């Protein structure tokens, strides 16, 4: 079993890793749908200009930016998600003469309404063919156009205010996919095909110049490349142990397994445990056994009168405590009251006290008389309960 597990582990470790086709659009990813190749292409597009990767929100960067020179701000992501503060800072930034390049599928309506454009996002289909894309500018246009197999090209822009908009690229239906929108002294470049800017298509000879040409519309200026919308706020030098764990699939799943294991332990094995409580037998009342033992000793010695006297004394105590009768005078009134309170017949009472009187008068009581007296007394106890 150990050899089998070891062999399976080595097989899993050394087998070729499958390609990860997750669209991250991140400049640190070498996977097909990352943008590391495009990011490294920036010095060729913007010659002698600095390219800076940003991991801060748009508002934070632009509100703290004191640069006097003009620049470009590039976004390549699945969804261009910005709030009111980010949007206002972008408008101020562009109105001063800077340019913003946004390549995404989802655009916020608040941004697009201001620019007079609407992004028509179509649901993906299982079509075998994709629409051909091509630039409008003759010098950029190619005879066969560009085909991106993993995007059918059905997304496009609807232009509401054409006076401020220039169409830079269309799909085969003539629908615009790349726009240049004037705002103040600068321009917004809206591009709805971010998949075309990933490593896979940037390095493919058939489509490698599409990304280069798309960025060539921007002025040659310093470039700010946004990674905040894809990777979050912290950079590589600010990674904590937990953030590193969450970026590694194996460590992330190990972390989740530990959490689930702790949860199951808390549910099934986390109950308070204690030693087995031994069974404690209640103390036995040995008084009756003691009395029986003493009685047997008297009986074996033949001291029947003594046993009878003790039985009679115990009976009188029982009558006083149970029925509240005085036992000094056992007369006719006493017997009538006792019969009334016990529910016994007067005959039974007379027979009982007759045998008691006989036992008290006889100095040497016989065994038969003692047994008869005992039966009478025990019968009284049973019937008077």
Image (tube, rainbow, N blue to C red):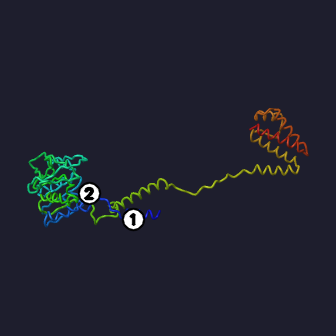
Name which of mark 2 and mark 1 comes first in the sequence: 1
- Vertical side of 344 occupied by 153: above or below: below
* Rendered residue at 10%/50% (across/down): 164
Please tell me whether mark 2 or mark 1 is closer to you in this view.
1
* Rendered residue at 13%/67% (across/down): 48
Q: Tell me where residue 29 appears, x and y as whole percent.
A: 26, 61
Quadrant where the C terminus sits is top right
The secondary element bearing badge 2 is classed as: loop
Q: Tell me where residue 23 appears, x and y as whole percent.
A: 26, 56
Mark 2 touches mark 1? (CB < 8 Å):
no
* Res 242 → quadrant: bottom left
Mark drawn on residue 10 = 1
Q: Nearer the viewer, residue 235 or 245?
A: 245
Would residue 335 appear left or right of 207 to someone viewing this image? right
Mark drawn on residue 24 = 2
Circle 1 residues within 10 Å: few <14, some 14–19, many ≥20: few
Q: Tell me where residue 188 appears, x and y as whole percent.
A: 14, 54
Instruction: Report if residue 162 is visible in the image.
Output: yes
* Res 264 → quadrant: bottom left
The secondary element bearing badge 1 is classed as: helix
Report, in whole angstroms, how far the alpha carbon at label 2 lies from the one at label 1: 29 Å
Q: Tell me where residue 64 appears, x and y as whole percent.
A: 19, 61
């Amino acid at each position: 079993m150990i050899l089998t597990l070891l062999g399976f582990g080595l097989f899993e470790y050394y087998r070729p890793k499958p390609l990860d086709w997750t669209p991250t659009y991140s400049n640190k990813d070498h996977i097909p749908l990352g943008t590391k190749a495009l990011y490294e292409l920036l010095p060729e597009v913007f010659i002698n200009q600095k390219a800076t990767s940003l991991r801060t929100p748009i508002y934070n960067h632009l509100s703290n930016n004191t640069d006097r020179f003009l620049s470009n701000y590039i976004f390549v992501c699945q969804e261009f998600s910005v709030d009111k503060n980010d949007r206002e800072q972008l408008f101020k930034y562009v109105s001063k003469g800077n340019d913003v390049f946004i390549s995404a599928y989802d655009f916020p309506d608040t941004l697009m309404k201001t620019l007079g454009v609407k992004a028509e996002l179509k649901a993906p289909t299982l079509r075998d063919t994709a629409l051909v894309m091509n630039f409008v500018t003759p010098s950029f246009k190619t005879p066969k156009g560009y085909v991106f197999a993993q995007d059918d090209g059905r997304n496009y822009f609807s232009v509401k205010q054409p006076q401020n908009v220039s169409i830079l690229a269309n799909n085969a239906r003539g629908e615009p996919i790349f726009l240049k929108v004037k705002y103040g002294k600068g321009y917004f470049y809206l591009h709805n095909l971010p998949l075309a800017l990933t490593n896979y298509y940037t390095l493919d000879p058939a489509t490698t110049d599409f990304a280069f040409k798309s960025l060539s519309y921007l002025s040659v200026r310093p470039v700010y490349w946004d990674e905040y919308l894809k990777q979050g706020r912290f950079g590589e030098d600010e990674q904590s142990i937990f953030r590193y764990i969450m970026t590694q699939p194996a460590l992330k799943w190990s972390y989740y397994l530990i959490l689930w294991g702790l949860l199951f332990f808390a549910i099934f094995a986390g109950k308070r445990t204690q030693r087995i409580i031994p069974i404690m037998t209640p103390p036995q009342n040995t008084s009756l056994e003691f009395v029986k033992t003493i009685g047997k000793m008297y009986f074996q010695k033949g001291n029947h009168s003594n046993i009878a006297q003790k039985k009679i004394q115990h009976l009188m105590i029982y009558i006083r405590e149970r029925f509240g009768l005085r036992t000094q005078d056992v007369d006719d009134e006493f017997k009538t009251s006792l019969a009334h309170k016990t529910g016994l017949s007067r005959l039974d009472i007379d027979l009982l006290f007759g045998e008691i009187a006989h036992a008290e008068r006889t100095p040497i009581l016989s065994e038969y008389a003692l047994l008869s007296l005992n039966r009478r007394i025990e019968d009284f106890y049973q019937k008077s309960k």
